[in-house]
Amino acid sequence: MKMPYNQTYTVIPDFEHNETNCLQNYNCTTSGWDVPFPLNDVTFIVYWVIFFIALPGICFALYKLRSQMTPDQVAPVYVINLLISDLIQICSNPIRMTAWQYGFFVSYVPYLYLHVNVFFMMCKSVERYIMIAHAVWYRKIQSRRTSVIVSVIIWMVSAVVWITSFFLPNMYGMVSVLLLPYPLVIFFFVATWRALSRTSVPRNDQKRIMATLALVLCIYTILFLPFILLLFDVDNNLFISAEILIALNPLFDLLLYVLIRRDVKDDLRALLSCFNKRPKANRANV
């Protein structure tokens, strides 16, 4: 199929054929992969808006989380890993929007991102539930080392599944893995809500905890689930809408950062002060 000059194309991996067949079905040229699935103008705009808005926000959030880590404080390791996976997605989108000669490889990046994200969201839900329902046990096992070990395992498993998809394409297996954490996220959302009703946790803290878990569930349901289910039919016109929803996820992860931070107002003041220092310095020099 001849690619129109004025359209940008992305690569949708064909899981029903091996890589050799893909090379036969798609025309690989020095300008990119000729595939029958265009990125429309809306997707193009959304990708770049997310890039310029979410990228500095995520970098600032990671900087604040890292700068305020102390030896006696357990860092929000799972949220940090979510933000790192967002960086992977944001940085891969501009490449996927262009007809890059390695577009076929880059087209698989969202699947690595998806695996990592859904499992870390599940970990966040489990952590909140244990913290509320089994507070004594949570204090015993609570450590940065435990969270780091779990994070490394998730990245390794996700990478293995991602790499395996190149050589042993299996759509049903991939979708099953991506859907596996979903019922657990729902279960721990309900279980945490019931556990909170039997505790003496302050009302404001209860609202913040449930808002965090509700956001995790909404991200999974509204942003991820349509994309995962439509993997069975990538030629569907709705698939490009699902890609747009996936692209919005970094913004929602930033909202997750806001919910877990008690001093988010101080963070915003610090960010605004960075923009105000330069004009003041210029006036002083004059």
Image (spheres, rainbow, N blue to C red):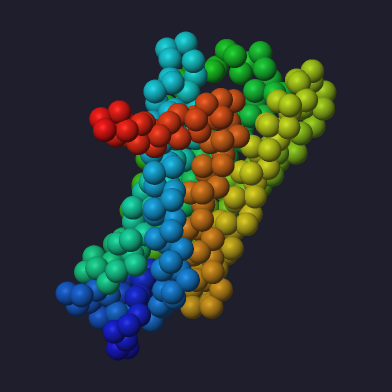
Residue 177 position (above or below residue 104): above
Q: Residue at x 79, y 18 (%)?
A: 200
State the image coordinates of residue 162 (x, y, percent, origin top left): 37, 53
- Residue 264 is left or right of residue 146, and the answer is right
- Residue 166 is left or right of residue 137, and the answer is left
Is residue 62 in sight in this rendering?
A: no
Q: Residue at x 33, y 61 (%)?
A: 94
Furthest-left residue in this view: 30
State the image coordinates of residue 19 (x, y, percent, origin top left): 29, 69
- Residue 285 is left or right of residue 56, and the answer is left
Furthest-bottom residue in this view: 2
State the image coordinates of residue 86 (x, y, percent, origin top left): 43, 47
Furthest-front residue in this view: 286
Q: Residue at x 47, y 58 (%)?
A: 247
Q: Residue at x 52, y 44 (%)?
A: 253
Residue 276 position (above or below residue 252): above
Residue 236 position (above or below residue 213): below
Is residue 141 in sight in this rendering?
A: yes
Residue 196 position (above or below residue 113): above
Counting every numbered tag in the picture gives 0
Q: Quadrant of the C terminus?
A: top left
Q: Quadrant of the N terminus?
A: bottom left
